[in-house]
Image (cartoon, grey):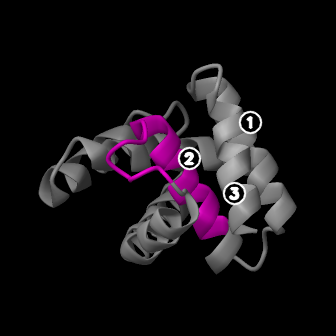
Amino acid sequence: MTRRQIREHIFLMLFRKEFHNEQELIEQIEMYLSDLEEPNKEENNYLKERLEAILSKIDEIDKLLTNTASGWTLGRMGKVELTILRLAVFEMRYDDEIPVKVAINEAVELAKGFGGDDTPGFINGVLAKLA
């Protein structure tokens, strides 16, 4: 699995947070991982650990986003945009292996694939301000 594929899987799992309580989220993640075409125990464990790391920092990430995205509350942001931003902020702030520019570029690519026409620009603007 490439880094981009890993990032996309994590985005899709993290997106579920907006719709499920904690217990349901655990079940949703297990179902998601079991539905992967070629389940690989090592890769699945990595995806789960990565998601758990992001979820453990979600309050800190949300505070950063609230302070950075002036004029936008988290509730006003679309769920896709919020999820992309959370993933990117985690990579920028808490993952030393991913350069900030790469995290921003990958977030913009996710936005192109999953967001609306204005999403890439919004994501780029918020993350550039944060960087």
Answer with mark 3 or mark 1, whichever residue precedes in sequence. 1
Local SS, label 1: helix
Residue bearing mark 3: 127
Rendering coords of residue 67 (x, y %): 51, 69
Rendering coords of residue 52 (x, y %): 41, 69
Question: Dot 2 surroundings within 10 Å: few (below 14), some, or many (20 or more)?
Answer: many
Quadrant in the rendering for residue 51: bottom left
Identify the disc placed on residue 84: 2
Identity of the amino acid at label 2? Ile
Residue at mark 3 to residue at mark 1: CA–CA distance = 13 Å
On the question of residue 79 being in view, the answer is: yes
Identity of the amino acid at label 3? Leu
Residue at mark 2 to residue at mark 1: CA–CA distance = 10 Å
Segment tinted magenta in the rendering? 71-91
Residue at mark 3 to residue at mark 2: CA–CA distance = 10 Å
Q: Is the C terminus in the top left, top right, bottom left or bottom right quadrant?
A: bottom right
Disc number lying in front (3 or 2) = 3
Rendering coords of residue 7 (x, y %): 63, 49
Identity of the amino acid at label 1? Glu
Residue in view at x 60 percent, y 41 percent: 8
* Most common SS among magenta residues: helix
On the question of residue 2 being in view, the answer is: no
Disc number lying in front (3 or 1) = 3
Identify the disc placed on residue 109: 1
Answer with mark 3 or mark 2, whichever residue precedes in sequence. 2
Residue in view at x 14 percent, y 58 percent: 23
Magenta highlight on residue 81: yes
- Left or right: residue 114 versus residue 26 is right
| Residue 117 against residue 94 in the figure, above or below | above
